[in-house]
Every structure is written in C-alpha cells, then in structure tokens.
Image (cartoon, grey):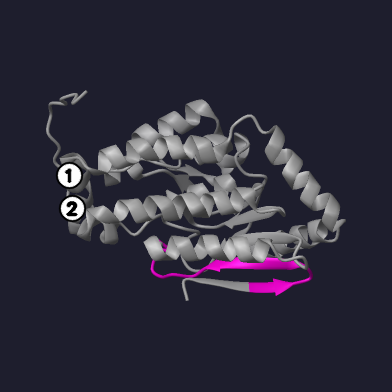
C-alpha cells in the first residue's frame, strides 16, 4: 500500500511506502491528502508524523504517468495542491521526518509541515526544471528563503542535511537509525499538551504567517500548466524516461 498509517499515544504516522522511490501518481496524491485530512481531523489524535520507508522520503510525482499522458497534469496538479494544503491546514501539528532524498513533491510535503526533522543522509532538491515542470518553490522558499530557493530551482542542485540545518530549513538533524524514535518522542511530547491549546496554536500560527502557501502555490501552478503544454516539457519527460540528455530548441519565442 502506497500510503498507510500507524498510531500510538495520540500520534499517527502517515507512512509513504511506494517503491522504488516513493513517487506518487495522481491517484496516490489524492489518497495522501485524504489520509492527512481524515487522521488530522480525529479528536483522539494530537500530532501527525509524515515519514517514509525505503531509500528516501519522497521523489515527487510519477513522471512516467505524465510522459505517457500529458493531460494527467491537471489531476497531478490538483492532487499535489490538495496534499500540501491538507498538511498545512491540518488542525494539529505535523512533523515531517525526512531521510534520503526529498525531491519535488517531497519538498511540498515537508515545506507544508510545521517543521522538519532530517536524518544525516537527507538531501533536498527541486529537479522540476529538468523534468519539464515547475512547482513547490513556494514550499522550498518557506524552508530555505528566497536566494537559496532561486538557486535550487534554476540549477536543480541538491543541498544536504547539514546545509539545510545551517540555513534554518530543518529543525534538527539526527543519525538515520535514530530518526523515527527521535521524531516519535518529540511528537508524543507535543501530543501530551492540551488538545484545545494545540489546535488553537496551530490555527493562530497559520493566521499570522506572512506567506500563504496555498495561494502562492496555486499561482505557481498556472506557470506549471503553461510549461507542460510546451514541446520543451515533453522533451524533458521523454529524455528522463529514455535516460538520455534532453535536446531543447535554442531560440525562445514569447507567445505573448
């Protein structure tokens, strides 16, 4: 099962387990969003943890689905929007426990969370521009700030956990083998607080945040859709699936 849950002591773990890289297709994103809303809305649950099994946290969308059918971008966009919004709007605190790679949609999940705890082997990247796409810069900026986000988006470069901690994008970094225990201990501490206080605190924190991730991400998605309808986008997806270097036209013609 791509998305499953485990629970104890007022904490629910939403686990992404979809080998080989935990990428999600359009249906998977809707399932993830539904799971977050369902578990976060329970009166007996006071903290959510999002974590993953396997080699890394989450590798974004299923590129093969989009390469096979470009019209799926509408469903993928909606599924990602619903997922990130579900995490951000969750009425209780959400902690992302990130190990290995955190790419694309993984950034959307982590960047929508209340905070992130990472393992020492964690890396963070937006590779969208190399896949004929855009998106989740809103959530990357929420974690890493304006200049680092722009560099990461333009270059598709990854940063490691130590750099993420240095610039304040993650709350703490722990050894890989201790990640789950560390996060669950923290989540149980949070869950032991007044349920009413936790929910009011989450509501108030979202209310005073200067950047509205849902509005900002929705704005981004318009550009994502425009790019996906271009030949460059299809070429990027084809090259990725075929494991070759993409070949783009040298001249850019502004249709506006």
Q: Give the range drawn in magenta.
A: 6-23
Marks 1 and 2 sit apart, C-alpha to C-alpha, by 8 Å
Residue 57 position in % (x across, y down): 50, 59
Residue 91 position in % (x across, y down): 70, 53
Q: How crowded is mark 1: few (under 14 residues within 10 Å), some or many (20 or more)?
A: some
Is-magenta flag for residue 18? Answer: yes
Residue 71 position in % (x across, y down): 25, 54
Frontmost residue, 63 versus 119: 63
State the SS at label 2.
helix
Residue drawn 39% across and 35% down?
153
Quarter of the image where the C terminus is located: top left
Residue 230 position in % (x across, y down): 19, 40
Residue drawn 48% across and 46% down?
124
Look at the picture and state if 26 lies above or below 114: below
Residue drawn 47% across and 33% down?
149
Is-magenta flag for residue 17? Answer: yes
Say which residue label 1 marks: 246
Answer with mark 1 or mark 2, whichever residue precedes in sequence: 2
Frontmost residue, 123 versus 104: 104
Q: In which quarter of the image is residue 51?
A: bottom right
Q: Is residue 89 visible?
A: yes
Q: Are marks 1 and 2 in contact (CB under 8 Å)?
A: yes
| Nearest to viewer (mark 1 / mark 2) | 2
| Residue found at the far right of this picture | 194
Say which residue label 2 marks: 238
């Amino acid at each position: 099962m791509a998305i499953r849950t485990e629970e104890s002591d007022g904490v629910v773990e939403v686990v992404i387990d979809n080998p080989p890289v935990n990428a999600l297709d359009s249906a998977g994103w809707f399932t993830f969003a539904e799971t977050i809303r369902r578990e976060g809305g329970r009166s007996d649950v006071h903290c959510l943890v999002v974590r993953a099994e396997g080699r890394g946290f989450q590798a974004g969308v299923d590129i093969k689905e989009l390469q096979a059918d470009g019209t799926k971008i509408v469903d993928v966009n909606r599924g990602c929007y619903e997922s990130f919004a579900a995490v951000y709007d969750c009425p209780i605190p959400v902690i992302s426990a990130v190990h290995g790679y955190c790419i694309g949609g993984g950034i959307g999940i982590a960047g929508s969370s209340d905070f992130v705890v990472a393992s020492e082997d964690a890396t963070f990247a937006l590779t969208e521009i190399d896949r004929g796409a855009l998106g989740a810069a809103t959530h990357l900026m929420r974690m890493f700030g304006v200049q680092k986000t722009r560099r990461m988006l333009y270059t598709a470069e990854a940063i490691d956990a130590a750099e993420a901690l240095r610039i304040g994008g993650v709350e703490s970094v722990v050894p890989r083998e201790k990640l789950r225990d560390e996060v669950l201990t923290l989540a149980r501490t949070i869950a032991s607080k007044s349920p009413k206080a936790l929910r009011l605190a989450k509501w108030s924190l979202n209310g005073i945040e200067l950047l509205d991730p849902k509005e900002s991400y929705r704005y981004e998605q318009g550009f994502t859709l425009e790019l996906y309808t271009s030949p460059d986008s299809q070429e990027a997806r084809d090259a990725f699936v075929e494991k070759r270097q993409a070949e783009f036209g040298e001249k850019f013609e502004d249709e506006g």
